[in-house]
Image: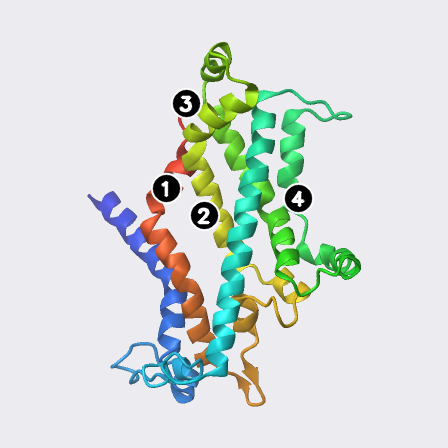
Amino acid sequence: MTRSMLIYAALVFWAFVSLFPIYWTVTTSFKTAVNVTQGHLIPFVDFTPDWKGWRSLGLSPDTIFEQSTVRDEFIRRFFNSIVASASASLLAVLIGSLAAYGLSRFSYKFLWMRNKDISFFFLSQLILPPVVLAMPFLVLYKQLMLLDSLVGLVLVYTLMVLPIVIWIMRDQFDTIPLELEQAALVDGCSIWGAFLRIVLPIALPGMVAAFILSVILCWNEYFFAALLTSTDAKTLPVMVASQTGSQGINWWSMAAIATAAILPLVLIGVFLERYIVKGLTAGAVK
């Protein structure tokens, strides 16, 4: 009994620690400058909620139907984030699934590397600090005229999440019996036919999980979005970080934008949780 109580107490404490930043962000979007600086936390107890943060974006009830250049900019940045995240994730899943299938079903030899070494090489790309790639990407994108473009952002995001997709999908393909493909080949299917008709439908939960995880990672990415964009292709994380003025940081505006940016991810987590868990744990038990 005591052990169970300690476990539940630890879980409640960890849930509080994990959710408090979200709570702070949401409540800050309804604070005025005085409430922010004085650290008031509880609405209607420590402070009276105000629409100042949302009003500065043209998203408050009294400004939502009025013309607002800030709201137009927010919508553009929101659209850019959706296009960049979804496109890069889709491209990464398509390419990563093919690479993972090859690593799962065929044996490769490149110099001293075998399949496990190649797989680890892909994952090791995540260890490299993004700042190391800043200068090469700037020079390359300038030569290719991809600076401040959604196409350039999609390409770098694809490279960023591709290693994770490959590892997730390789585990998915490893759990699929090889006999199913052999039976399809005996029935007259080609290798591509067996892959498309037999393997992919079974591995679909893993593909969905890899896609959702990639979208989340791309959606939250800031470094490359700030480095490679200036005006047209800016995303929401860049807009959040730009909420500074001559008098300091506009915490209420920053919190309002951050809350709007968090909302899609919260909806993904709530409604697609079972697909994420099913896809990520499909290869856990054999």
Identify the mark nearer the N-term, 3 or 1. 1
* In the image, residue 258 above or below residue 6: below
Q: Tell me, yes or no, if residue 161 can be seen here.
A: yes
Residue wearing tag 2: 212
- For badge 2, the amino acid type reads Ile
Q: Which mark is residue 286?
A: 3
Mark found first going from the N terminus, 4 or 1: 4
Q: Amino acid at mark 3?
A: Lys
Q: Earlier in the sequence, mark 2 or mark 1?
A: 2
Image quadrant assignment for residue 60? bottom left
215 up-or-down from 243: above or below: above
Q: Which residue is mark 4?
A: 125
* Quadrant in which the C terminus is drawn: top left
What amino acid is labelled 1 in the image? Tyr
Crowding at mark 4 (Cα within 10 Å: few <14, some 14-19, many 20+): some
Query: As drawn, which residue projects farthest toward the left?
Result: 1
The mark lying in front, picked from 3 and 1, is: 1
Question: x, y (%) of residue 188?
Answer: 50, 13
Residue 275, label in figure: 1
Q: How far apart in space, not on screen, are marks 4 and 1 (Cα)? A: 27 Å
- Name the image quarter holding residue 17: bottom left
Q: Check the image and report above or below for 66 versus 265.
A: below
